[in-house]
Amino acid sequence: MSNQRISLKEKIGYGLGDAASSMFWKLFGMYLMFFYTDIFGINAAIVGTMFLITRVWDSLFDPVVGVISDRTETRWGKFRPYLLWMALPFGVMGVLIFTTPDLSDTGKIVYAYVTYSLMMMVYSLINVPYASLLGVISANPKERTALSSYRMIFAFLGSILVLVLVDPLVGTFSNWHSQTSLSLGWSMAALVFAIIAIVFFLCTFSWTKERIHPIKETENSLKEDIGDLIRNRPWWILLGAGIAALIFNSIRDGAAVYYFKYYAVAPEVLDWGLFGSTLSITTVYLVLGQAANIVGILFVTPIANRIGKKNTYLFAMICATIFSVAFYFVGKENITMMLVLQVLISVCAGSIFPLLWAMYADIADYSEWRTGRRATGLIFSSSSMSQKFGWSIGGALTGWLLAYFGFQANVVQTQDVQDGIRMMLSLLPAIGTILSVLFILFYPLNEAKLKGITIELASKRASRG
């Protein structure tokens, strides 16, 4: 089983699941703060606090989903059924988040808290089992790295789809029936993405297969699973590295729209004739970043197979730190250099995420090898938890920093605000990459150790029959 090859169709099917998730994750990361402040009319500091509270709660909810999915038994397996059960609720909540009912200021805040919290819980219920699939589709570490790469390529393709279409769709739907309504434009655009996401999730459910079963047939107690996780040193290290890397990405993503609206001097650059509107420099910047992420993913598998996942991760994060610091010194009119550095940073950032997911699968094997018990869902839920917790901190910091610098929506910003937004795309995110490097330096699972673990586990599964 450790040498089993996974078909191209199954790799694509697995990738489509993250394309579905990433469409809305990218909407949240790039546009939700902007949507709440500039479209729905909520104060930036309030939004930042909401992001922290709801995402921290949701991060804690992820391990609950992991424990439940580990104990799920159906004819479709442990994890695949959640893709079927949660696809429609995911789409519905995605639309409701970008719907703006006519409410008082307090009512808007309550509505935002409720819809965003529910969306994040549904996201956990579909994404934690989806992530856990990586640990049970194949036992081959190289196949897992390849699956993880497919996952991230499709994730960034989903993100590109959103970034290319969101402005044209919002513009088109905002002008229905000769009436201008940005609120309607956003909710209808979200509906389009929701339909696509539902179809993608159903494809993942249909095209993938669970193959790996635990050596130990008896059900683990929750106390045993959590105790194993707490004593798992590689898990703690990877958790810290992942949170730091996601703080880096979330601050850059959250500040990008503000950077080009309120700081950079740039015109709209491309006529998008298909929808009768234009692509702004913001969209070009973001799409270039997603395309560069894919380039990073394409390079990461051969490089990691040659020098190891840990060394590849270290190299990528060190380069991302250097390029992020360089971004601070780019002038507001130097659009070309902004785009060049965005590409370089995104190549580095894109390469680390398939590494993180593959390393979590390695940690699941390490835990089973060390304890004789397998808790794939719980371990992968921690990766989702780190993702959300990193975005929680980064998203909250984005709102708080905007408020701290004195940001006011839809007005010309002061020099202090512009300087602050400038740092939010450069120096402040670089702190996250430095922390990520410091964590991963202590990661102990090298390729030689993992090879021995894989062989030993395969032998035990074979003897079990």
Image (cartoon, rainbow, N blue to C red):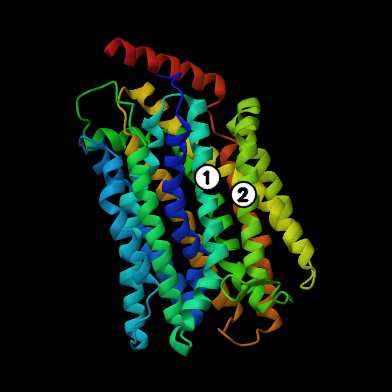
Residue 284 got which mark? none
**In terms of image quadrants, where is residue 229?**
top left
Q: Amino acid at mark 1?
A: Met
The location of residue 46, given as percent across then percent down, is: 44, 77
Q: Amino acid at mark 2?
A: Asn
**Front-most of residues 354 and 324:** 354
**Front-most of residues 209 and 274:** 274
Residue at 45% x, 70% y is: 189
CB contact under 8 Å: marks 1 and 2 = yes
Q: Which residue position holds label 1?
A: 152
**In terms of image quadrants, where is residue 91?**
bottom left
Q: Earlier in the sequence, mark 1 or mark 2?
A: 1
The location of residue 362, given as percent across then percent down, is: 46, 30
Furthest residue to the top? Answer: 463
Q: Is residue 354 left or right of residue 92?
A: right
Residue at 68% x, 61% y is: 427
Residue at 37% x, 38% y is: 207
Q: Is residue 102 left or right of residue 284?
A: left
Characterize the local packing of mark 1: few (<14), some (14-19) or many (20 or more) Cα atoms within 10 angstroms.
many
Residue at 36% x, 69% y is: 95
Kind of element beneath mark 2:
helix
The quadrant the C terminus occupies is: top left
The location of residue 358, given as percent across then percent down, is: 49, 35
**Front-most of residues 391 and 334:** 334
The quadrant the N terminus occupies is: top left
Kind of element beneath mark 1:
helix
- State how far apart marks 1 and 2 are (Cα): 9 Å
The location of residue 317, given as percent across then percent down, is: 65, 45
Q: Which residue position holds label 2?
A: 293
Query: Can you see residue 434?
Result: no
